[in-house]
Image (cartoon, coloured by chain):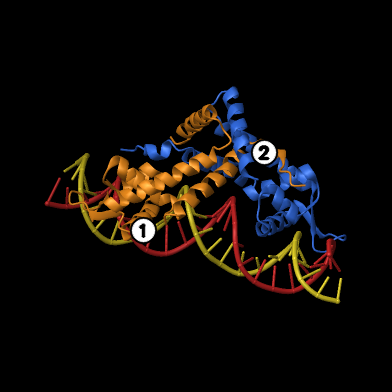
Chain colours: A blue, B orange, C red, D yellow
Amino acid sequence: MENTPERLTGKPSWLLTQLSVHAHRLATEAFTGAGARGYHYRVLAALDEFGTASQADLGRRCNMDRSDVVATVTALQERGFVDRAQDPKDRRRNTVTLTEPGKAQLDRLDEALDQAQDDLLAPLPEPDRRTLTRLLGTLLAHHQR
Amino acid sequence: MENTPERLTGKPSWLLTQLSVHAHRLATEAFTGAGARGYHYRVLAALDEFGTASQADLGRRCNMDRSDVVATVTALQERGFVDRAQDPKDRRRNTVTLTEPGKAQLDRLDEALDQAQDDLLAPLPEPDRRTLTRLLGTLLAHHQR
DNA sequence: GCGCCAACGTTGGCGCGACCAACAATACAG
DNA sequence: CTGTATTGTTGGTCGCGCCAACGTTGGCGC
């Protein structure tokens, strides 16, 4: 009486979207412990890996809309995790820079997120985890051109 | 300059949620052609596979909140795709039944959705598709207890 | 039979992530 | 110099998942 229709369970898009709900929940739980959200982590990670960037760059790199970058950077700035300044070379742009507390926050989030990855993949042995990651990566690369 | 941080691209949860965005987009495009949404398909599929059911049953089977089932059934009823009647044996319940036009709508959606699955998995050969489906199924089964 | 608890449908709300349209300011190519 | 493109910003929309509350109804223990 609790069965899910095979029309759904057999479709990769169903498996993907349903599983992404769990992945999102696990990640959110990890983030909220540190008072952050998914968008915050994305921006902090991009700043750490590529250094100071404009908001438009952040949006492109993190797959975020410009308007959402605005709110995210504002929130991070209020918490002291990033600096936001007008770019003197191009006064249209803001240069967003990771601060020391921001880097520390990123490290905290990373640790919590790694645990979430483990929970997510719990039932799979290591080889299967790599296979899954590879297949997902292939598909994602194909779809985001 | 358009690179995504490895901190994200290496995490299964990132791959999953990002790919689910594409899966959801493909499915939505397939549905909107027939004036439907994801919730509609779920309910129609459950009714077709298990027959007449109460709204609470539909919610459990389709992984939907009771309140969302209300709105979905109402929308389907307005389009003539389901019948909704009070259950004479248990006056708390509504019996929701798939109509002939509803079955036809389900077939239309199924066809469009199959095409979307193919687009989603386009870069993968058949064996990889099966492997991916199996791995995702294992994880989903584990997480929804 | 009565009282309590559980289940059902319904309403009204929230949060997150994705996205869109419009605008002023600025840069840049022709 | 003139038009085009980019950037930041504001103010929305939508889908999906979820939660609290309420009145109605059934079923169970006593």
Residue drawn at point x = 39 percent, y = 39 percent: A7
Q: Earlier in the sequence, mark 2 or mark 1?
A: 2
Visible residue check, residue B99? no
Front residue (pair A30, A140): A140
Q: Is residue B129 left or right of residue B145?
A: right
Give the percent coordinates (x, y) of residue D21. 38, 59
| In front of the other: A78 or B45 | B45
Residue furthest to the right: A89
Relative to residue B121, is residue A102 depicted above or below? below
The residue at the point 38 percent across, 36 percent down is: A6
Is residue B42 in view from this perspective?
yes
> In the structure shown, which secondary structural element does the residue marked by tag 2 occupy?
helix
The answer to whether dots 2 and 1 both sit on one chain is yes
User: Residue at (67%, 59%) from the top-left corner?
Assistant: A71
Q: Amino acid at mark 1?
A: Ala
Amino acid at the residue labelled 2: Thr
Residue B100: image location, x then y, percent:
27, 51
Residue B135 picture location, percent across and down: 51, 29
Q: Is residue B82 left or right of residue B24?
A: left
Q: Which residue is mark 2?
A: B9
State the mark number for residue A64: none
Element type where label 1 sits in the image: helix
What's the residue at 36%, 42% (across, down)? B61
Give me the chain letter of mark 1: B
Instruction: Categorize mark 2 by other alpha carbons within 10 Å: few (<14), some (14-19), many (20+).
Output: some
Q: Give the labeled residue for mark 1.
A: B75
